[in-house]
């Protein structure tokens, strides 16, 4: 078919796309920060020997890792408001779902990283009189973090891709803006191509960073 | 909180949810059937000695790995029919998208497995007169496949989670059925909770199985590629 590609209508809507890009980044960064922070505590809880601590943490991690992110977003947007004490808009629902999702995955990364540190490091720290939290903060985490960086970057890649799911509940991120522009101008080919390219430009450097970092880590260890 | 849970309405429509689950599995399995061979092909092309082929296939793999699957699905569903003039059903678009999307990830699993096999194996096969294809089929792949299994199954789980996106183009998968039932019964809390539980019921045992297999393989010496 001879079809003339016409990107001018997409270009005319660039401000809508920019707003979408801003919202995508806002959602992604919010969830990443929360996931990285909360994940440490959930990961540590899973590592605990106390059943009352590690069982709920494990259940949380398994539930969020073994259900689709889109179902989580829909649940927080359509189902959760019924029992929630506060109002939930599209951003809050998406941020809640994806933050908890990121927390569960990050918790596993922390746990894996901490477990990869040899037992002797804990013993040595204990022998010089450190408490558990001192051992963790001063000895174990600083060593484990470097090993975890590629996995965290991978999570960031996955998370940035997942933010596009928020378009389903009409949060005005990039994909949602793209849908609106495509419907309004009848130009799905150009619009979705441009949206895909913007996502690629946003996410690929991160993916490339993972490879670079892994290669460096591989050389140094 | 004064909310009264009522799962009876969900039970009444449980056949619709089950049908949705079957459709979810159908898309997942078809995407695997097409995605795995396509992924193997892409991996081999990415390892090709031709620079142009290597670069082009590498770019395609990276592109499909680095863009959100929902954008790909919308492209194949809304844009491709306009470009080609061929009508495509939600089911067709879903299978097409997820075959290609998952093949990009499978390609990386295959590549990881293949490059993890020591150089000496290639040399030894060559020394006894095997061609590149023979070496690959008889020596390298059989060894690489065991190492790939955990990473491969991990991808299958991801794929099944990703297929929920087909609900957005009105293919009647589990999530789509849940949306409809939630709207007609005004019971979103129960319906979405049950849908989540159904996904969990399939995915959790699968993940446990993968982990057990991974430990088993690690013990038996066949280390994982990832």
Image (cartoon, helix red, strand yellow):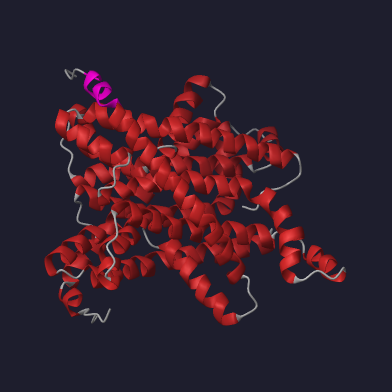
- What is the quadrant of residue A14 in the picture? bottom left
Q: Is residue A132 left or right of residue A118?
A: left
- Residue at 53% from the left image edge and 45% from the top image edge: B154
Counting from the top left corner in percent of width and height, residue A131 is at 58, 32
Task: Look at the picture and state if A99 lies above or below B201.
Answer: below
Asked if one can make out residue B142 in the rendered structure from this viewpoint, the answer is yes
Horizontal and vertical percent for residue B16? 28, 31
> Observer-nearest residue: B138 or A129?
B138
Residue B20 against residue B144 in the figure, above or below: above
Please give the range of residues in magenta.
B5-14
How far across and how far down the image is residue A101, in percent? 38, 42
- Image point 16% across, 61% down: which residue? A180
Residue B100, given in percent of the width and then of the height, sits at 44, 60
Residue at 29%, 53% in the rendered image? B90
Residue appearing at x 48%, y 63% in the figure? A207
- Residue A182 in the image: above or below residue B174: below
**Does residue A162 sit above or below A43 in this rendering?**
below
Q: Is residue B2 magenta?
A: no
Q: Report which quarter residue B1 is drawn in.
A: top left
Q: Nearer the viewer, residue A76 or B80?
A: B80
Residue B107 is at least partly visible in this image: no
């Amino acid at each position: 078919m001879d079809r003339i590609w016409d990107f001018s209508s997409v270009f005319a809507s660039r401000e809508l796309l920019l707003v979408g890009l801003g919202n995508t980044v806002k959602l992604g960064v919010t969830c990443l920060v929360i996931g990285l922070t909360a994940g440490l505590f959930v990961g540590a809880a899973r590592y605990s020997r106390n059943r009352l601590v590690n069982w709920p943490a494990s259940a949380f991690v398994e539930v969020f890792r073994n259900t689709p992110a889109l179902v989580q977003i829909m649940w927080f947007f359509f189902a959760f408001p019924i029992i929630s004490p506060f109002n939930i808009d599209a951003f809050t629902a998406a941020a809640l779902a994806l933050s908890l999702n990121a927390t569960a995955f990050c918790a596993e990364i922390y746990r894996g990283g901490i477990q990869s540190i040899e037992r002797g490091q804990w013993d040595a720290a204990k022998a010089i009189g450190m408490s558990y939290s001192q051992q963790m903060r001063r000895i174990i985490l600083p060593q484990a973090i470097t090993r975890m960086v590629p996995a965290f970057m991978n999570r960031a890649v996955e998370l940035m891709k997942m933010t596009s799911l928020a378009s389903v509940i009409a949060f005005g991120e990039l994909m949602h803006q793209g849908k609106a522009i495509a419907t309004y101008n009848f130009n799905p080919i150009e619009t979705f191509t441009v949206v895909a390219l913007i996502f690629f430009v946003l996410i690929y450097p991160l993916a490339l960073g993972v490879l670079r970092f892994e290669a460096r880590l591989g050389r140094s260890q | 909180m004064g909310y009264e849970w009522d799962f009876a309405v969900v039970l009444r429509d449980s056949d619709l949810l089950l049908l949705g689950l079957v459709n979810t599995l159908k898309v997942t399995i078809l995407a695997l059937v097409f995605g795995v061979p396509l992924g193997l092909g892409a991996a081999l092309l990415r390892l090709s000695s031709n620079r142009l082929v290597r670069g082009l296939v590498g770019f395609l793999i990276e592109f499909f790995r680095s863009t959100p699957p929902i954008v790909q699905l919308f492209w194949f569903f809304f844009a491709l029919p306009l470009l080609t003039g061929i009508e495509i059903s939600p089911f067709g678009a879903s299978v097409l998208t997820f075959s290609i999307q998952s093949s990009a990830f499978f390609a990386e699993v295959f590549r990881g497995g293949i490059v993890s096999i020591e150089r000496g194996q290639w040399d030894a096969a060559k020394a006894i007169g095997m061609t590149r294809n023979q070496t690959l089929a008889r020596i390298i792949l059989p060894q690489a496949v065991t190492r790939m299994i955990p990473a491969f199954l991990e991808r299958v789980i991801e794929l099944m989670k990703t297929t929920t996106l087909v609900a957005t183009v009105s293919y009647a998968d589990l999530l789509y059925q849940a949306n409809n039932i939630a709207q007609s019964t005004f019971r979103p809390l129960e319906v979405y909770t049950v849908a989540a539980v159904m996904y969990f019921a399939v995915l959790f045992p699968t993940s446990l199985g993968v982990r057990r297999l991974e430990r088993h393989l690690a013990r038996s010496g066949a280390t994982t590629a990832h």
